[in-house]
Image (cartoon, rainbow, N blue to C red):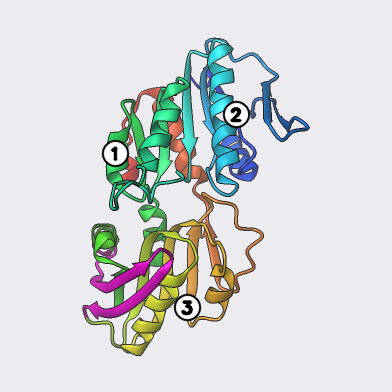
């Protein structure tokens, strides 16, 4: 069945697309992505995709808006080239933190992006650890929502840490942290915090016993690392033996690298949904999401259930 599959890589994360291609033993479709002199994006698919099941792989990281536009154009090009089906594989879904109207006169940007993807004829979306699971409901097409928790669980098991506590950096992430804690048979703690303004965090306290424990903070995004560093400092103040972080998307913008390198954080474990080769973090460990995405693509094409991937 994979003979009728075409993989197209956008320019945001070619290394990840190449890994997926190699695992599936499907060469990437020859695609041209360039710019006109005025900065407009130009794309062209140089091979036939007629009647093929196309998977366009594009992580919507920085430069976010350029990568979104490129993805939309690639999908449109594939549709106009008579592809049988076009699927968007989006390891990092942008604008996911703007998923509700929490203030007057603000957009629901995650919904706007969902509308754009559907407007060009996307027939399925594959995403990894959405900031809010309800974003799946913004789509009227199938959404395959992959979790990185099994990757983190396998990695932590290999470390064989004793007295393990999984920590949620806020109440909203308690469900995610609890899932990982159950996989590892670990205790659960939750940090109570207040955010006075965007990208500014004031940490107050932690619910749960962390004294003398090996703590693992689990979250979906590390952006400026303000929350992460403040949380790690508090846990050490409460007597934690070590503090690691397992975070799916390493956005790492602004002062993030400096903050993490100057913190007491034992280790930062992230996946490669976003390229971070240019982020010189002293204690960074990158786990590859490519095998998981490749298996999801394989199961979609073969009509097999995906539930086994989350066990």
Q: Is residue 124 magenta?
A: no
Q: Marks 1 and 3: CB-CB under 8 Å?
A: no
- Answer above or below: position of 45 versus 308: above
Which numbered dot is residue 46?
none
> In terms of secondary structure, where does tag 3 sit?
loop
Q: Is residue 193 magenta?
A: yes
Q: Marks 2 and 1: CB-CB under 8 Å?
A: no
Front: mark 1 or 3: 3
Q: Residue furthest right?
A: 37
Measure how far apart labels 2 and 1 are at the Cα level.
26 Å
- Answer above or below: position of 180 versus 289: below
Q: Earlier in the sequence, mark 1 or mark 3?
A: 3
Q: Is residue 189 visible?
A: yes
| Residue at 52% from the left image edge and 57% from the top image edge | 251
Q: Is residue 25 visible?
A: no
> In terms of secondary structure, where does tag 2 sit?
strand
Which numbered dot is residue 265?
3
Side of 279 relative to 308 (left or right): right
Q: Which residue is mark 2?
A: 8
The span shown in magenta is 181-208
Query: How many numbered marks have been drawn onto this rendered protein structure?
Result: 3
> In terms of secondary structure, where does tag 1 sit?
helix
Main secondary-structure element of the magenta-colored stretch: strand
Q: Earlier in the sequence, mark 2 or mark 1?
A: 2
Q: Which residue is mark 1?
A: 307
Q: Between residues 42 and 260, which one lies in front from this camera angle?
A: 42
**Location of residue 310 in the rendering, given as x and y in whole percent from the top left corner:** 31, 46
Q: Between residues 234 and 22, which one lies in front from this camera angle?
A: 234
- Answer above or below: position of 21 versus 258: above
Measure how far apart labels 2 and 3 are at the Cα level.
38 Å
């Amino acid at each position: 069945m994979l003979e009728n599959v075409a993989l197209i890589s956008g320019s945001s994360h070619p290394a990840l697309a190449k890994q997926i291609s190699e695992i599936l033993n499907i060469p990437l479709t020859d695609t041209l992505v360039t710019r006109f002199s005025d900065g407009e994006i130009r794309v062209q698919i140089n091979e036939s995709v007629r009647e093929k099941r196309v998977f366009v792989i594009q992580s919507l990281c920085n430069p976010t808006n350029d990568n979104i536009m490129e993805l939309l154009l690639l999908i449109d090009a594939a549709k106009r080239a008579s592809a049988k089906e076009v699927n968007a594989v989006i390891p990092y879904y942008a604008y996911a933190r703007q998923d509700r109207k929490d203030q007057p006169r603000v957009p629901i940007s995650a919904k706007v992006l969902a509308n754009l993807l559907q407007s060009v004829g996307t027939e399925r979306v594959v995403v990894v650890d959405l900031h809010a699971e309800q974003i799946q409901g913004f789509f009227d097409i199938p959404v395959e929502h992959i979790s990185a928790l099994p990757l983190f669980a396998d990695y932590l098991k290999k470390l064989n840490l004793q007295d393990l506590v999984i920590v949620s950096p806020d109440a909203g992430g308690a469900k995610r942290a609890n899932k990982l804690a159950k996989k590892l048979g670990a205790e659960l703690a939750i940090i109570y915090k207040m955010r006075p303004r965007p990208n500014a965090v004031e940490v107050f306290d932690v619910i749960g016993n962390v004294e003398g424990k090996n703590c693992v903070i689990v979250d979906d995004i590390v952006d400026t690392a303000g929350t992460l560093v403040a949380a790690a400092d508090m846990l050490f103040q409460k007597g934690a033996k070590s503090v690691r972080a397992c975070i799916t998307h390493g956005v790492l913008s602004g002062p993030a690298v400096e903050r993490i390198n100057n913190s007491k954080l034992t280790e930062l474990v992230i996946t490669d949904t976003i390229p971070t080769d240019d982020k010189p973090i002293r204690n960074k460990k990158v786990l590859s999401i490519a095998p998981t995405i490749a298996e999801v693509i394989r199961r979609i094409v073969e009509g097999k259930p995906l539930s086994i991937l989350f066990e």
